[in-house]
Each structure stands twice: as C-alpha cells, then as structure tokens.
Image (cartoon, helix red, strand yellow):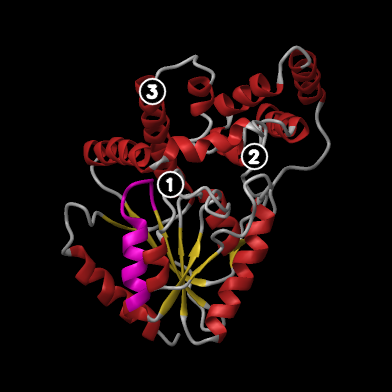
Amino acid sequence: METSAKKQKVIVIVGPTAVGKTALSIELAQVLQGEIISGDSLQVYRGLDIGTAKATIDEQAKVRHHLIDIREWQESYSVADFQQEGRAAIAAITEQGKIPIIVGGTGLYIQALLYDFKLGSEGKLSQEQQAKVRQLEASSAQWSNQELWEQLSERDPLAAEQIHFNNRRKVLRALEVMLTTGHSITTPKETPVALYDYFLIGLTTERAVLYERINQRVVMMVQQGLIEEAKRFLTAPNVQAIQGIGYKEWLPYFHEEATLDETVALIQLHSRRYAKRQLTWFRNRMAPYWLDLLTHPEEKITLLKKLEDWRNDAE
C-alpha cells in the first residue's frame, strides 16, 4: 500500500461478485464516518438494480452513496468518466472530513481511479506487426460486430469487459494491441503512480462457497424481478449496458430460443467465470489485504485495528 501524508486517505474494498463487499462497506462507513463510492461499471445506470446487485434503498439510506444512478441505461459510460467523477467524489467526501470508501469489482475502474496512468499503446509497428494487423483486418471484414468482440473476449477478456461490442473501432484496436505486443490494451505503458494513500481490502472465500453463493444469488435475482428488468433491452439491444452479465443472456429467452432454466444456468456460469477473472485481476494487478469474512468473520476485528492504525499514521 502506498502511503504519504500529502495524499488523501481512501479505503477500497474489492473482490468477486457475491462475496459480501456491500455489507462490509456499509458497516465500515458507519463505524469510520465514511461515504461510499461505487466502483461498479453498471451500477451507474438507473433502473438496473437487481442484475447489478445495487445497494438497496434501505442500505443507501444508512450511508450516502456516490456514482450510483448517474446515467440512463441507454447511455455509454467509460473508464475516463469514472476516473473523473470518482476523483471528484473523493475530494468532496474528504473536504467534509469523512473517509471515502470505494467498493466494487470492476478492476480496471478501480485501478484507473487510484493511479495516474493512461490506457493503450502507441508507437510505430515493425513489419511483422504490420503483417499481423493486415491479417486481422482481412479476417475481421467477414465478422459481425458480435463475432469480432468474441475474438477479443477470447484473447483479452479484461479489455472485452470494458469495450462495447458495437464499438468496432475500439474492439479492433484492442485486438491489434494484443496481437502486436502480447499485452492487453488495459496495461499501462509506464509504472503508474498512486494518487492516494489507500488501504486496499480484498474479500475472497473458498471457491465452492463462492460459487454456491453466486448460484443462489442468480436464483434470488430472478425471484426479485430480473426478467422484467432485462426486458427493457428488447427496445435497444445494442446499448453498452446489455453487455452486463445478467442482462445479455435473456435475449434468446425473450425470442423463445432458450428456456428459463437454460438462461438461469447460463447467467450462473457467466457469473462464476467473471468472479474467477475478478480474483485473477486483483491478485495480479494489485496487492489487497485479503480476508475471508464469510468463513472467518472474526477477522473483522483485526481489520478494524489495522484500519485504525492506518488512519492514525502521520507519516
């Protein structure tokens, strides 16, 4: 963790879906006089409540939340948007004498907020690299936008999560970077510098426990009205938000091309795979203080002590 007296203190809670991030964030905000900033790429959208596991009205009433319900579901939202608005929220919360608590599972958003780095890759290509680009351009001419995006998803799932499948130019650019450099377009060119004195909490648990919680959560979402929430995309099937897990899977069901059970099982599968990618991201890209509060709730006592020491650190 980066520390500096000149930097604003920020608590960050990351981890896979269904691991208890929301509950911990609300508890810490109440204990530590904090306010919560959502670090989720879909919770910004109004009306997408169930499928995004957004904090409920009751939960939001307990603690002030930021960057929730700030866009219409038809609109686009980028990492750059989050970076700018998230930093403004951190400044506003800090000015009130409170502690910002960022909570979410969208790894690139969290990293872009905490660090000063630019995405992408520039520079001249070698002849070999240029040949790869020409080959990609020739092949991609035969692919639909969805098929092109699926190629990116196979080669660079982290980038695919951040780029809308209809943004053909960006999808092609991300594929070019991966094919020519071997690195994701989401990887910064230079070693990034931390902008905040942050305490990064990573929530995890045993895989079997996590996967069972994910499966149960999907069933509960359906019972709470997820199908009705997803129906809005029938009128706009190409918007960015539909790429969120829990929404895109319903289109075949609505067109009578898949059964309810098949759709629920597919959402569960995609959610489990996403959870695995989330854990991989945070383990490889950042260094959280890992906790398993689901099976070891007593670890919260140690966490609170560490947070107290960190907040009192005057270095």
Helix, strand or loop under label 2: helix
Could you say which disc has been placed on residue 240 in the image? Answer: 2
Residue 298, given in percent of the width and then of the height, sits at: 16, 64
Could you say which disc has been placed on residue 106 in the image? Answer: none
Three-letter residue code for mark 1: Ile
Distance (Cα) linking label 1 and label 3: 17 Å
| Picture quadrant where residue 216 is located | top left
The segment highlighted magenta reads 15-30
User: Could you tell me which residue is drawn at 37 percent across and 86 percent down?
Assistant: 312
Q: Is residue 230 above or below residue 1?
A: above
Q: Earlier in the sequence, mark 3 or mark 2?
A: 2
Instruction: Name the one closer to the observer, 311 or 192.
Output: 311
Instruction: Name the one closer to the observer, 171 or 36.
Output: 36
User: Could you tell me which residue is drawn at 42 percent across and 63 percent down?
Assistant: 57
Q: Is residue 117 visible?
A: no
Q: Earlier in the sequence, mark 1 or mark 3?
A: 1
User: Could you tell me which residue is drawn at 37 percent across and 73 percent down?
Assistant: 62
Q: Earlier in the sequence, mark 1 or mark 2?
A: 1
Residue holding disc 3: 260
Helix, strand or loop under label 1: loop
Three-letter residue code for mark 3: Leu
Residue 239, given in percent of the width and then of the height, sits at: 66, 37
Three-letter residue code for mark 2: Gln
Q: Is residue 32 above or below residue 215?
A: below
Binning the other alpha carbons within 10 Å of mark 1 as few (below 14), some (14 to 19) or many (20 upward) gives many
Residue holding disc 1: 50
